[in-house]
Image (tube, coloured by chain):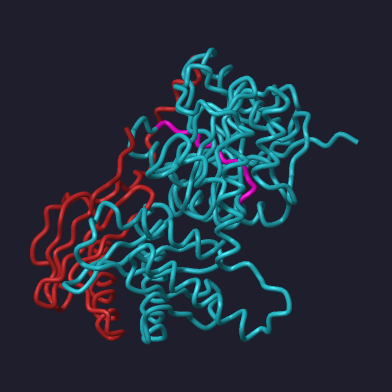
Chain colours: A red, B cyan
């Protein structure tokens, strides 16, 4: 079964879940981040855009929010409204 | 005629596909093995004909294994999925299980590991082929429990209704414990029995599980049935000769009473289909809120797929006036609002309870 050691071949890398916080201004620009610099910035910007739109759409529906927390199977996203921008926390849910 | 199960193996490296094929052909059930090197090709094959098991690598260019599994989970819910990977990382193991895979296996480096993998896979292939009936549709949970207890079985039932999950332990025909979110023992058992529909699976028995229920199953079933009869007679049971308008009015009254009883401020429910009007109780703004519900559900689904974070279960939110929970169920999505002083750790459980009674 020596052939099986070939499994250690070099392969494309898998994207880890983001972990940390990002601060976003009202225009969706990331002004501070503690997420690993290895994580793609364009994906974080998409997260920021979606979060800001969630706050905006809630206001339009007369349901203004100060905070929301999205629960995914393996990640929690907590967003706090901050003067039109947002403070966003990304927390992977790692099972014991 | 006996049909052979079909296994689809996805790995971007043709050399390993050849190896897999050789190994899998050694399985006692002699399944048909198909291989492919890309997620797109795997999707096309799965669309074309039914497979029993998909074995999928994680690290692949273009569409990685987690993306493939995320799509497969939605489009082929009956398909058994196995991850076979060289990535020994707890995060990816958790994420794969969160996507509903049946088996996560590190690529074997010894003959013994390979043999164990083949045994697990054979067990997975045969799980539904074992003797016994499947597809009980017109039996209540009470009926099923009685049958299990009469046959002196030892088993664990895992019962799912929407976002609620409960477990019932049976040992040698005795009901020994029950558990659902926020309750255990007799209270949990009664709560689970109130669910009028759902799915259940039987898990291996746990002989060492602690016993918390001392009453006989028949006594508990009788008590629960009496309590449910009393509730239904005062609540939403149809009344003979009642006009549709009267029935709708009575149901509205019952739901507003449920709101008051649970302490919620208002509820909006929205069909999951793109068309369909929202319904609101305790609020005049159902249409406005439903627009946000629709947007939030879609945006959250998009984010989950983009981040490969798995399906979303709920969104909790707050402002200075209220707390609220957006909770999807099988056919409808609910937005339930609570007073700002409501304990945040209880809001989700209370919402699930209310939605369950609403849906029943």
What residue range appears in magenta? B77-86
Q: Position of residue B94 (x, y in %)?
A: 38, 39
Q: Nearer the viewer, residue B169 or B223?
A: B223
Q: Position of residue B22 (x, y in %)?
A: 66, 26
Report the residue at 50% width, 47% height from top: B191
> Which image quadrant is residue A68 in?
bottom left
Q: Quadrant for residue B326, please give it.
A: bottom left
Judged by its main secondary structure, the magenta piece is: strand
User: Is-magenta flag for residue B210?
Assistant: no
Q: Is residue B132 left or right of residue B182?
A: right
* Relative to A33, residue B250 above or below: below
Question: Is B82 inside the magenta-drawn segment?
Answer: yes
Q: Point out residue B65 in the picture as x, y percentages from the top left corner.
A: 47, 46
Residue B135 showing in the rendered view: yes
Which residue lies at the image location 50% right of the left edge and 65% below the top edge? B358
What residue is rendered at 47% in x and 50% in y?
B164
Residue ID at (26%, 60%): A69
- Position above or below: B287 against B195: below
Image vertical order of residue B200 relative to residue B324, above or below: above
Q: Nearer the viewer, residue B155 or A10?
A: B155
The answer to whether residue B130 is left or right of residue B315 is right
Quadrant of the rendering where the N terminus of chain B is positioned: top right
Question: Which quadrant of the figure has residue B320?
Answer: bottom left
- Quadrant for the C terminus of chain B in the image: bottom right
Is there any visible trace of residue B12 in the rendered image? no
| Front in this rendered view, residue B96 or B220 | B220
Q: Relative to A37, say whether B220 is above or below.
A: above
């Amino acid at each position: 079964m020596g052939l099986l050691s070939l499994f250690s071949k070099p392969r494309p890398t898998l994207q880890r879940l983001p972990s940390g916080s990002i601060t976003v201004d009202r225009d969706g620009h990331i002004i501070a981040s503690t997420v690993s610099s290895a994580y793609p910035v364009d994906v974080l910007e998409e997260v920021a855009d979606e979060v800001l739109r969630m706050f905006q759409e809630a206001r339009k529906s007369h349901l203004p929010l100060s905070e929301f927390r999205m629960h995914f199977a393996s990640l929690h996203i907590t967003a706090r409204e901050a003067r039109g921008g947002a403070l966003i926390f990304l927390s992977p849910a790692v099972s014991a | 005629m006996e049909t052979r199960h079909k296994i689809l193996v996805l790995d971007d490296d043709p050399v390993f596909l050849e190896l897999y094929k050789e190994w899998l052909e050694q399985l006692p059930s002699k399944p048909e093995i198909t291989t492919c090197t890309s997620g797109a090709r795997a999707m096309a094959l799965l669309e074309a004909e039914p497979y029993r098991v998909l074995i999928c690598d994680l690290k692949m260019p273009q569409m990685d294994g987690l993306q493939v599994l995320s799509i497969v989970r939605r489009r082929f819910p009956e398909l058994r999925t196995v991850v076979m990977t060289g990535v020994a990382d707890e995060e990816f193991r958790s994420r794969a299980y969160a996507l509903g895979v049946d088996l996560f296996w590190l690529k074997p480096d010894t003959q013994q590991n390979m043999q164990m993998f083949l045994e697990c896979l054979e067990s997975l292939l045969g799980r539904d082929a074992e003797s016994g009936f499947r597809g009980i549709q017109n039996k209540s949970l009470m009926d099923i429990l009685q049958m299990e207890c009469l046959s002196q079985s030892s088993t664990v039932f895992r019962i799912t209704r929407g976002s609620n999950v409960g477990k019932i332990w049976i040992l040698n025909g005795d009901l020994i414990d029950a558990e659902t979110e926020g309750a255990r023992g007799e209270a949990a058992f009664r709560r689970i029995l109130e669910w009028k529909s759902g799915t259940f699976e039987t898990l291996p028995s746990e002989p060492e599980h602690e016993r918390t229920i001392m009453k006989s199953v028949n006594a508990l079933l009788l008590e629960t049935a009496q309590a449910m009869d009393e509730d239904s007679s005062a609540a939403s049971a149809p009344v003979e000769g009642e006009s549709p308008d009267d029935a709708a009015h009575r149901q509205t009254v019952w739901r507003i009473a449920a709101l008051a009883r649970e302490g919620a401020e208002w509820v909006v429910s929205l069909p999951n289909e793109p068309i369909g009007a929202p319904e609101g109780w305790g609020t005049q703004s159902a249409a406005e809120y439903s627009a946000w519900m629709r947007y939030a559900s879609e945006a959250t689904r998009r984010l989950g797929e983009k981040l490969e974070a798995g399906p979303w279960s709920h969104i909790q939110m707050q402002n200075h006036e209220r707390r609220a929970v957006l909770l999807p169920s099988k056919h409808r999505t609910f937005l339930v609002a609570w007073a700002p002083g409501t304990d945040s750790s209880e809001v989700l459980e209370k919402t699930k309870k209310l939605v369950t009674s609403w849906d029943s």
